[in-house]
């Protein structure tokens, strides 16, 4: 077999190696990228290392005699009407009815939510928001729960309490990490 200049034969395969400095730099860069990619996949992406990304999510009580931490949190976020909602036009009938007594209804709704053992707690904020429809004021809820409390469970409680069969917009975030 005749070997051409700039070629290597290895296991029956002919490989050309770079003949210029630019080709050598490009090849070195390519091998460095390949090595870093393999290092990332095989070392950095191990499951025990991926928890690093979520270590900043800590739910619990700290600095007292009854400290605790909670892992595997699902955070549901959703909207309810407030007393300021009534000033907007084209409201669903249930939103218009709820806006008249929104303060008491939201307090009662919060009590119903926290009576569920799968819900750790909530907070709510007065907000103005706009999605695909018209802008509107109301309350934005952030609810922390165990994974056993699903988005469908929340939608069911919401629809029963607010007396609506409309779809409910809910954002759910799963925080699966180990806490110390």
Image: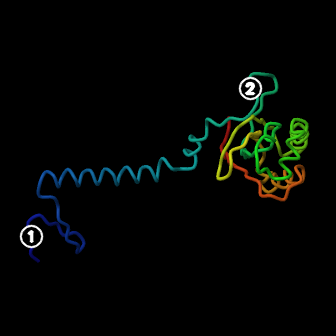
- Distance between mark 1 and mark 2 Cα atoms: 72 Å
Foreground residue among 60 and 157: 157
Residue at image point 66% right, 41% down: 178
- Where residue 25 sits: x, y (%)? 20, 50
Q: Which residue is mark 2?
A: 62
Q: Which quarter of the rendered picture does the C terminus lie within?
A: top right
Residue at image point 53% right, 50% down: 46
Indicate left or right for 153 with 56 as reference.
right
- Where residue 13 sits: x, y (%)? 23, 72
Q: Which residue is mark 1?
A: 4
- Where residue 94 sits: x, y (%)? 86, 51
Q: Secondary structure at mark 2?
A: loop
Give the colour scheme shown.
rainbow
Q: Earlier in the sequence, mark 1 or mark 2?
A: 1
- Where residue 44 sits: x, y (%)? 48, 47
Vertical relation: 40 (above or below) 62: below
> Residue farthest to the bottom?
1
Foreground residue among 126 and 101: 101
Quarter-of-image position of residue 179: top right
Report crowding for label 1: few under 14, some 14 to 19, many 20 or more residues within 10 A (C-alpha). few
Residue at image point 68% right, 52% down: 133
User: Are discs 1 and 2 less than 8 Å apart at CB?
Assistant: no
Q: Nearer the viewer, mark 1 or mark 2?
A: 2
Report crowding for label 2: few under 14, some 14 to 19, many 20 or more residues within 10 A (C-alpha). few
Quarter-of-image position of residue 57: top right
**Number of numbered markers:** 2
Q: Which quarter of the rendered picture does the N terminus lie within?
A: bottom left
């Amino acid at each position: 077999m005749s070997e051409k200049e700039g070629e290597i034969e290895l296991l029956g395969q002919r490989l050309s190696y770079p003949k210029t400095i630019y080709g050598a730099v490009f090849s070195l860069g390519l091998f460095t990228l390949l090595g870093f990619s393999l290092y990332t996949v095989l070392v950095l992406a191990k499951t025990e290392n991926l928890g690093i990304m979520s270590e900043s999510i800590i739910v619990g009580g700290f600095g007292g005699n009854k400290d605790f931490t909670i892992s595997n949190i699902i955070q549901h976020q959703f909207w309810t009407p407030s007393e300021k909602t009534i000033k907007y036009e084209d409201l669903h009938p249930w939103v218009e009815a709820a806006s008249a007594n929104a303060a008491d209804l939201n307090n009662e709704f919060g009590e119903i939510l926290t009576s569920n053992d799968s819900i750790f707690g909530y907070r709510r904020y007065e907000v103005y928001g706009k999605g695909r429809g018209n802008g509107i004021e109301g309350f934005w809820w952030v609810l922390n729960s165990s994974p056993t409390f699903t988005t469908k469970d929340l939608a069911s409680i919401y629809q029963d309490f607010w007396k609506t069969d409309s779809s409910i917009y809910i954002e759910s975030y799963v925080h699966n990490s180990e806490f110390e």
